[in-house]
Amino acid sequence: MSVFNYKQRNLIVLAILIFLGCAILYSLRTIFGAVLSSIILYSIFRPLFLSLTLRWRLRRWLAATLVIIISLVIIVLPFFALSLLVLDKISELQQDPLRVEYIIHRIDDYVGSRINQPNLLGNALNNASVYLSEFLPTLLTGAADILLGIVVMYFLLYFMLVQREDFEGGLLRYAPFREQNALKFATELKNITNSNIIGQGLIALVQGSLLSIGFYLFGIGDGIFWGVITAFLSFVPIIGAPVIFVPAAIIQLANGNQTAAIGLLIYGFVLITNIDNVIRYIVVKRVSDTHPLITIIGIFIGIPVFGILGLVFGPLLLSYFFLTIRIYETSKMASDRLDRIKSADEENY
């Protein structure tokens, strides 16, 4: 006869499950970004997959393959193009170091002399290099593992789509909420994902395009390159685009081109930065509004863990965290209400 009763055995099994689950999660920590990416892509492309299979009557394997190809073109290739642009620009600057020194010298002469801070930019660049020496290895590590992450991500996404009913049924069955709250959690999860990915992606695309146009209008070179950089920096609200057009305006002032500098600053602060608020109001608020503070804090959380992809994953994880808190509070309130009703019925009985 066992020395443990039924309840004790269940507790022991639960403890073993928790230990094994933690061990598995720790072992999979290097591909956690790929797992999260597959869930995000599933949420975004699920309507397209359903349309291909239900409306157009495509076989599931073919529909899933088409979804993977489309997501590669829309999401993965832009990151690849950005990498090529950055590498090309670095190579160009390395071949012409005198150009960089000349720009730094002109900015120091213009800005440093006016605020009585000689060698201002040089000191700032030295401080930035110390920060980047710690920050860039995280990005480079993410870049080195990105191929494995893409393979794992699409492998998981394929089976999520092909076995959609089993995947969603399993999530619903093992969700730590009641069915009603689990469905609400899934809906809110989809809305938050669409808000952060689709809404913020549209903002980034528009801001990057506007900056390229602004550089062209005011006769500043490399408009396409800096527009692409701005598109990625636009995931950081408020401070993203100004990081590009403000230094560009200062360089124009240092070169004596005051018209282009003032015009670019007005164009940037009036149009580029405010288009963020317009698109956020029109598009993002209709889905799920994400507070800029959550985005900024999420970026600081996500970049050390996921590298450059932390620009997206960090705010998402923080949004998911607060969503889980809201669902928990709703469940707790419902449970407390049922307990009060039950207690009242027992007292009346």
Image (cartoon, grey):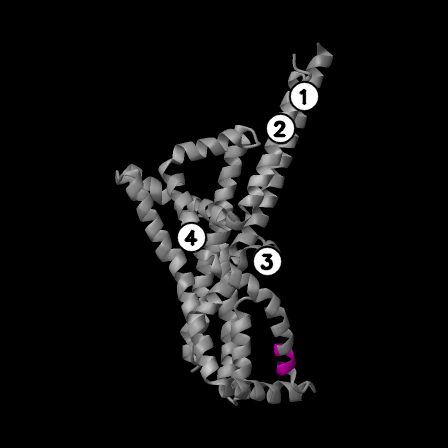
Q: For the residues marked 3 and 2, what is the alpha-carbon distance in whole angstroms?
A: 32 Å
Q: For the residues marked 2 and 4, what is the alpha-carbon distance in whole angstroms?
A: 34 Å
* Amino acid type shown at disc 4: Ile
* Amino acid type shown at disc 2: Leu
Q: For the residues marked 1 and 2, what is the alpha-carbon distance in whole angstroms?
A: 10 Å
Badge number at residue 150: 4
Kindly indicate the quadrant of the structure image that contains residue 73: bottom left
- Residue 190, x across and y down, in percent: 48, 43
Lower position in the chain sequence, tag 2 or tag 4: 2
- Residue depicted at 39% across the width and 42% down the height: 46
Q: Is residue 120 above or below residue 231?
A: below
Q: Is residue 124 magenta?
A: yes
Considering the whole magenta stretch, tell me its main secondary structure: helix
Q: Is residue 91 above or below residue 337?
A: below
Q: Which of the pair 67/155 is nearer the observer?
A: 155
The residue furthest top is: 349
Q: Is residue 13 magenta?
A: no
Q: Mark 1–mark 2 contact, CB under 8 Å? A: no
Q: Which of the pair 252/302 is nearer the observer?
A: 302
The residue labelled by disc 1 is: 8
- Residue 232, x across and y down, in percent: 48, 64
Q: For the residues marked 1 and 3, what is the alpha-carbon distance in whole angstroms?
A: 41 Å
Range of residues picked out in magenta: 121-125
Q: For the residues marked 1 and 4, what is the alpha-carbon distance in whole angstroms?
A: 43 Å
The residue labelled by disc 3 is: 304
Q: For the residues marked 4 and 3, what is the alpha-carbon distance in whole angstroms?
A: 19 Å
Mark 1 or mark 3: which is in front?
1
The residue labelled by disc 2 is: 14
Within 10 Å of the Cα at label 3, are there few (<14), some (14-19), or many (20+) other Cα atoms?
A: some
